């Protein structure tokens, strides 16, 4: 069975990742903490620009998150289809 580099990377990522909410937080905290800091700053100082920036950054993160999930899902699906065609585990 020959997997592409992207398929191998996604399979390795899913095998080695922590499926809990804490695991997801550990993976994405570098992106989320600055966004929340901007939002908190804007709320405490009544700064509409900072709140707007935080909203734009959070919206951008959500779009990026779903886009990455879709791409990795495609690679994982492809790898699983290759595995199934090789092993035929579903038919048994």
Image (spheres, grey):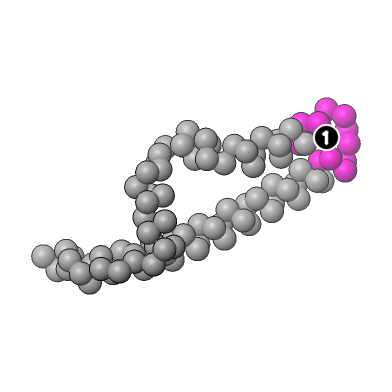
Name the spot of residue 16 as percent of width and height, x first: 37, 43
Locate residue 86 relative to residue 63 in the image: left or right.
Answer: left
Quadrant into which the N terminus falls:
bottom left
* Residue sticking out furthest to the bottom: 85
- Residue located 30% across and 69% down the image: 2
- Residue located 83% across and 27% down the image: 44
Quarter assignment of residue 33: top right
- Residue located 40% across and 43% down the image: 17
Quarter assignment of residue 91: bottom left
Residue nearest the observer in this picture, 22 or 86: 86
* Residue 74 shown in magenta: no
Name the dominant secondary structure of the magenta segment: helix
Residue nearest the observer in this picture, 50 or 43: 50
Quadrant into which the C terminus falls:
bottom left
- Residue located 41% across and 49% down the image: 13
Query: Which residue does the numbered mark 1 point to in the structure image?
Result: 42
């Amino acid at each position: 069975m020959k997997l592409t580099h992207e398929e191998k990377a996604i399979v390795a990522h899913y095998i080695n990742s922590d499926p809990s909410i804490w695991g997801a937080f550990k993976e994405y905290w570098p992106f989320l903490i600055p966004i929340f800091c901007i939002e908190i700053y804007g709320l405490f100082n009544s700064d509409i620009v900072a709140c707007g920036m935080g909203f734009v950054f959070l919206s951008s993160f959500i779009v990026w998150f779903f886009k990455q999930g879709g791409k990795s899902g495609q690679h994982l699906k492809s790898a699983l289809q290759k595995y199934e065609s090789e092993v035929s585990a579903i038919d048994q």
